[in-house]
Image: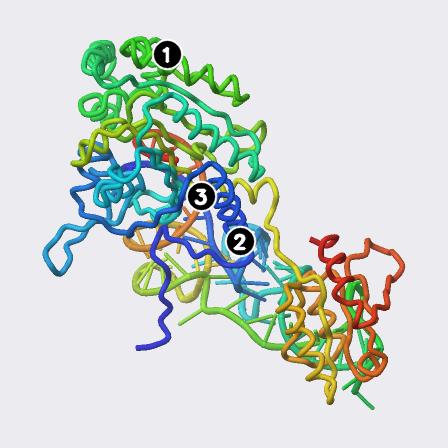
Amino acid sequence: MSGQKISGVKGMNDILPPQIETWQRIEAVARSLFARYGFSEIRTPIVEHTELFVRSVGEVTDIVGKEMYTFTDKGDRSITMRPEGTAPAARAYIEHGIANTEPLTRWFYMGPMFRYERMKTGRYRSFTQLGAEAYGAMDPAQDVEVIALCAAFFKEIGVPDVVLKLNSLGDGSTRPAYLAKLKEFFAPVIGGASEDAKRAFEQNTMRLLDSKEEVLQDAISKAPAIIDFIDEGSKAHFATVCRLLEKIGVLYELDRRLVRGLDYYTRTTFEFVYQPKGDNALGTAGTVCGGGRYDRLVKELGGPEKPAVGFAMGMDRLVLLLESVKGVQRSAPTLFIGTFDGPERDEAIALVMALRNEGFNVDFDPRGGKLGKQKERASKVNAAWFAGYGATEAAERKLKIDNMRLPEGAPKETVEISLDGLRAWLNDAGKRSS
RNA sequence: GCGGCUUUAGCUCAACUGGUUAGAGCGCAGGACUGUGACUCCUGAGGUUACCGGUUCGAUCCCGGUAAGCCGCCCCA
């Protein structure tokens, strides 16, 4: 009957304190930075009609082929929990006729995505993406703005060792010719490869280029690169993207074999990959951000002809990465006030609440108890300062405040502050302790 | 989806080739200090050794299954 423990669903994790603070920091930096770049936040539902993803992401991709959480709702509709954010954003863009009200639209979103995959570090069934979409600009400056936004984000958040990889897939006009060449090239060696590779060969030949299979490595290194086949317009576009990136000081690496898994990409594609010198906290899940241009997606989904560029970042991976380089940081109160039983306790509590309402980070122990225990508690929550408030303090209208963050073996440091001067002192102490 | 590894207290890990009351550190709780003070000392509470079954006189240890996690492939953020 009762008492049976129920665990969470495999691959879907809870985020609890103190780890939540890393998430909130990322979210805060994102909101502020994206706003400065002119991007507005959108929120779309977790689920969409299955058809949306089949048509945009591509029928033969693994995402659509075997990784979607799809179910039939009570109205007999086929519904899918979104496996990515670009298609829902495009759907909303079309559905609300945004193209009719503004020629240029820049959006971003954050939220959970769902894919039924084998679990690994940095790869979950429910994962969170932070993505941006820019509609309406064909100019290479738009590609560059989006890429620069990513680079600025990594810099601001303090993620080291991410390198930008860049490639161009062309506008699609020359792709059939390229694919034919590629198939021809791999045909002699594909026989010795795995079933996975053979399936890729048939259905999604470009994917072979980032296969890790031993028998294919030699061929991969010599395989024709799509960038040598692309149309003149795409070539010029790509050259400008590269030139502008150099101009604004964003470092990149050309990666002739960079192909992306979703069907809708055209022209510029890019990835930010975590490549530290030592241990890699992400293992083989090193891609932290992937994006590119998808000039035909909006039209293919029934909208107007509108070019677009965007990217998606894996926030779970970002969190993992930040924790591996910075550890988990926990916010702490500036001042912890200890209370005594007696008539002054009400005053002490009122003081705590008043200070909080004025914007100060002040804590106390609502359980009361011995002052020693309260001070222990203050130490546990890493309070910067501690002061008892009892009969003496109430009478003298001043606090004796102890420094709780003294280095090992240092002499005690206690300051006496009048209640009237407390706000000014806290302002100063808050700045120094955070 | 394929191959390999792992699972002992809330956390990190012990326990000789299967042998009886499964340990430690951290954390948590209490006391020394019957309320002006924490980082000291003492004490305590937590385990059907992931779950189900098998072999055995006897299983944390061996075998099978299930679940969860990890590594590589695949895929991708």
Q: Quadrant of residue B5?
A: top left
Distance of label 3 from label 1 (alpha carbons) = 32 Å
Give the answer, above or below, for where A69 lies relative to A412.
Answer: above
Residue type at tag 2 = Gln
Labels in figure, total: 3
Pinpoint the chain carrying mark 2: A
In this image, A155 relative to A257: left or right?
Answer: right
Tell me the mark number nearer the camera, choosing from 1 and 2.
2
Of residues A429 and B56, the one drawn nearer to the viewer in this rendering: A429
Q: Quadrant of residue B31?
A: bottom right
Q: Earlier in the sequence, mark 2 or mark 3?
A: 2
The residue that label 1 is drawn on is A221
The residue that label 2 is drawn on is A19
> The N terminus of chain A lies in which quarter of the figure?
bottom left
Question: Who's the residue at 61% across and 51% down the image?
Answer: A329
On the image, the x and y values in percent for residue A240 come to 41, 15
The residue that label 3 is drawn on is A315
Both marks 1 and 2 on one chain: yes
Q: Earlier in the sequence, mark 3 or mark 1?
A: 1
In this image, A14 relative to A276: left or right?
Answer: left
